[in-house]
Every structure is written in structure tokens, then in C-alpha cells.
Image: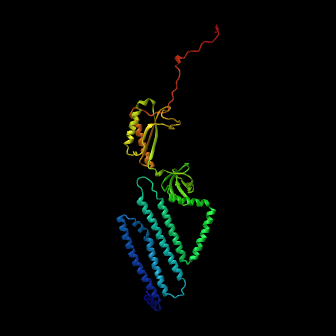
């Protein structure tokens, strides 16, 4: 390398323009060859990843552009280093150019690292996505992704300050100042800090994740989780309105995650007429047989077809087995599916079939009736005549 620089210096002494042109040409040829080899390697890696369905393919696709850009920045940097040996020592601006190139290279490496993190996250999501109608819980993956990006940006920031020539003592001073600043912010805005802390708890405890249907215990918040941020959780209500909930609320409120239920329950009450009491035993037996043979019903769960033994709240009245107008049955069972739309279709099918079973037995479902008892006018005795004797 020293001999090469000496030859270039000799050429520069005799013909400066030719020396610089030679350096530029050599760097351009080397960069072109390296870029060609790099593209060939990336192409082969992509083909191999596609044939084996490896996540490497998506990662290669993410790093292609920043990696090639880094190669060109290195080439320009090499040209600057070589050219600097051909220039007088007192030429200003060389250090600035070197720092700018180093910063540009750091930026592309940071960009490439971010794209690798993004590509890895997306590849895992595609591989582990559910296709059974349930919701995907990637809260832990998102938390790791945020942590990885935080580390990448922190390291990049420290390296950038080092490129600018900031001394370690100054960096330590910045850390101390940052600590005092963080303490001041904590004291000034405890609500903000509590929301951020609650957001971290949600990330690691994972009581719910994006796509989950949640309900707070008081029923004030219900909807589908869209995103869990450090300060806010975004929920879309069933009326499609966005709800922005501070994370600290979930630290003090019990939350039901309806998406993580293993089954959905069918609990319905049916009233049969009193005159159909002799047919009731056969009706209940056939309904049990139907439910036991239904593939959509989870046979490992409790299935009941019984006379109700408590309050049914049927209509506007509270009544038990023998109601004011009907004999009340309870249908209690669980479906295998948890998807709400699919569950509704299964419940409709079950209840319509039960209604037909009742009709097949010659019975009918009851409706509220009122019996009014009156007197036969032929049996009414007229009141005695109380007029005085002899009066007209």
C-alpha cells in the first residue's frame, strides 16, 4: 500500500490531474465489481430462501438497498482517503468530508439494522398468523421490536457523537444532565410517567393484544384493540369510533378479554304451553339428542336441557319453572368456535332446530296470555223490588 501511495505521489508531482483521475477510475472499477458480486450474492440468497420458505428471503429484501448504498459510500470514502494523500496537507475541509462520509455510513447501517428488525418481525407475524378466525397476539413480539429499535437508535446516537468528536467525559456529562432532566420530568408530570409505566406493564404482562375484543368491568370501554402505545391504548368501538384510553386505567380496572375464551356459551330460555305438559319429556329428550350429535357443540363442556330452577327474567317478569303463561326450559351449552360472527350463525341454527323439535311433537311455544272470568247473565238473580207497597 505504501508503494502504491509513493507511485501515486510521484505521478501527482508530475501530473496531478492524471493521478486524481486514476484514483477515481480505480475506485469506480472496484465499486462496480463489488456491487456486481453483491447483487449476485443477494440474488442467490433470495432464490434459496424462496425455495426453502425461509424468513431469510424477506430479510435480504429489506437490506438490499441500504447494503448497496453502504458499498457506494465506502467507495467514495476510499477515494477521499486516497485523494487526501495526493493533496497538500494544508487543504481545508478534508476532515469535514471524512466525518460526513462516516456519518452517512452510520446512517445507512442504522437504516439497514432497522429494516432487518422490521423484516424479522413481519416474517414471524406471517409465519405464526392464525387462519381459524381467531385473533393474533403479537404483543411480546412488538415489545421486542420496540426494544430492538431503541437499542439501535441509542447506539447510533452515541457513535454519531463520537464521530463529531464529543469526548467520553462530555458524554458522561450528557448522561448526568439527562438523569436530572428525567427526574425533573418525573416530578412535573407523574400522570404521564404512570401511563408510560402502565404501557410497559401491558407489553410484558400481555393481558390483551392488538385484535383482541376487550371489555372493562364497568362496561364503560368495549371494543377491539388496535394498538398499545407507551402512553395510550387505541381501541375501536363496535360503532367504529376510535377510543383513546390512558394506559394507567388498565392498572386499576379489571378487564375481560373476550377473544381468549376457549368456547362461547349458548344460554337461552324457551316457554312451552301448559297444555303441552304431557309432551314435554319427549321434547327435552330429543333436544338433548340433537345437541349431543351436533359437531359444532363442544361435548367436553356441560350441556343442559332442563326446567329452569331460578330466575329467567323472561320478558318483563321474573319467574322460574312454572311461569305465569308457560313451562320454562333452559338450553345451556357451549360451541367450539369463538369467532363472534360464526357463533351467531351456529346459535341461530341451534335455536331454529329446537323450535322445530317442539313443533314436531305437536306442541307450541307459549306467549303471554290473560284469562278473564265473567258471570253468565242468565244466572244472575235480579235484585229484589224494594219499592213501597201500592206505589206505581
Residue 13 lies, with reference to residue 93, above or below; the image says below
Image position, residue 329 (x, y; %): 45, 36
Q: Residue at x 56, y 55 (%)?
A: 251
**41 with respect to 237 (left or right):** left
154 or 71: nearer the viewer:
154
Tell me residue 224's x, y (percent). Answer: 50, 53
- Location of residue 311 in the rendering, given as x and y in whole percent from the top left corner: 51, 37
**Outermost residue, left direction?**
51
**Quarter of the view holding residue 120:** bottom left
Quarter containing the N terminus:
bottom left
Which quadrant does the C terminus fall into? top right
Q: Residue furthest top?
A: 390
For residue 39, above or below residue 321: below
Residue name at image x 43 percent, y 88 percent: 4
Nearest the eye: 278 or 95: 278
Residue 229 seen by the camera: no
Residue at 47%, 61% (x, y): give it. Answer: 141
Q: Quick one: 51 or 157, which is closer to the camera?
A: 157
Amino acid at each position: 500500500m505504501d508503494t502504491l501511495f509513493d507511485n501515486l505521489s510521484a505521478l501527482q508531482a508530475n501530473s496531478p490531474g492524471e493521478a486524481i483521475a486514476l484514483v477515481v477510475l480505480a475506485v469506480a472499477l472496484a465499486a462496480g465489481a463489488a456491487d456486481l458480486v453483491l447483487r449476485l450474492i443477494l440474488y442467490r440468497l433470495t432464490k434459496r430462501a424462496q425455495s426453502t420458505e425461509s424468513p431469510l428471503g424477506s430479510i435480504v429484501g429489506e437490506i438490499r438497498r441500504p447494503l448497496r448504498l453502504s458499498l457506494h459510500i465506502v467507495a467514495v470514502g476510499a477515494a477521499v482517503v486516497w485523494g487526501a494523500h495526493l493533496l497538500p496537507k494544508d487543504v481545508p475541509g478534508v476532515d469535514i468530508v471524512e466525518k460526513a462520509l462516516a456519518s452517512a455510513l452510520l446512517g445507512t447501517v442504522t437504516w439497514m439494522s432497522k429494516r432487518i428488525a422490521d423484516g424479522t418481525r413481519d416474517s414471524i407475524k406471517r409465519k405464526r398468523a392464525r387462519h381459524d378466525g381467531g385473533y393474533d397476539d403479537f404483543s411480546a413480539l412488538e415489545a421486542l421490536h420496540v426494544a430492538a429499535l431503541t437499542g439501535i437508535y441509542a447506539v447510533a446516537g452515541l457513535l454519531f457523537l463520537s464521530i463529531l468528536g464529543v469526548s467520553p467525559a462530555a458524554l458522561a456529562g450528557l448522561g448526568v444532565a439527562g438523569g436530572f432532566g428525567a427526574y425533573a420530568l418525573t416530578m412535573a408530570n407523574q400522570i404521564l410517567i404512570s401511563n408510560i409505566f402502565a404501557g410497559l406493564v401491558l407489553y410484558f404482562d400481555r393481558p390483551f393484544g392488538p385484535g383482541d375484543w376487550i371489555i372493562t368491568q364497568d362496561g364503560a370501554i368495549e371494543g377491539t384493540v388496535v394498538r398499545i402505545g407507551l402512553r395510550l391504548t387505541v381501541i375501536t368501538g363496535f360503532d367504529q369510533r376510535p377510543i383513546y384510553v390512558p394506559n394507567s386505567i388498565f392498572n386499576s380496572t379489571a378487564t375481560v378479554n373476550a377473544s381468549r375464551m376457549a368456547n362461547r356459551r349458548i344460554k337461552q330460555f324457551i316457554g312451552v304451553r301448559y297444555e303441552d305438559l304431557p309432551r314435554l319429556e319427549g321434547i327435552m329428550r330429543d333436544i338433548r339428542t340433537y345437541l349431543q350429535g351436533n359437531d359444532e357443540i363442544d361435548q367436553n363442556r356441560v350441556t343442559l336441557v332442563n326446567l329452569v330452577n331460578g330466575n329467567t327474567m323472561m320478558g318483563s317478569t321474573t319467574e322460574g319453572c312454572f311461569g305465569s303463561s308457560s313451562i320454562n326450559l333452559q338450553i345451556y351449552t357451549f360451541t367450539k368456535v369463538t369467532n363472534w360472527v360464526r357463533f351467531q350463525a351456529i346459535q341461530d341454527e341451534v335455536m331454529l332446530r329446537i323450535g322445530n323439535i317442539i313443533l314436531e311433537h305437536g306442541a307450541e311455544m307459549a306467549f303471554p296470555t290473560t284469562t278473564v272470568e265473567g258471570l253468565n247473565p242468565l244466572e244472575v238473580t235480579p235484585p229484589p223490588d224494594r219499592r213501597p207497597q201500592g206505589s206505581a
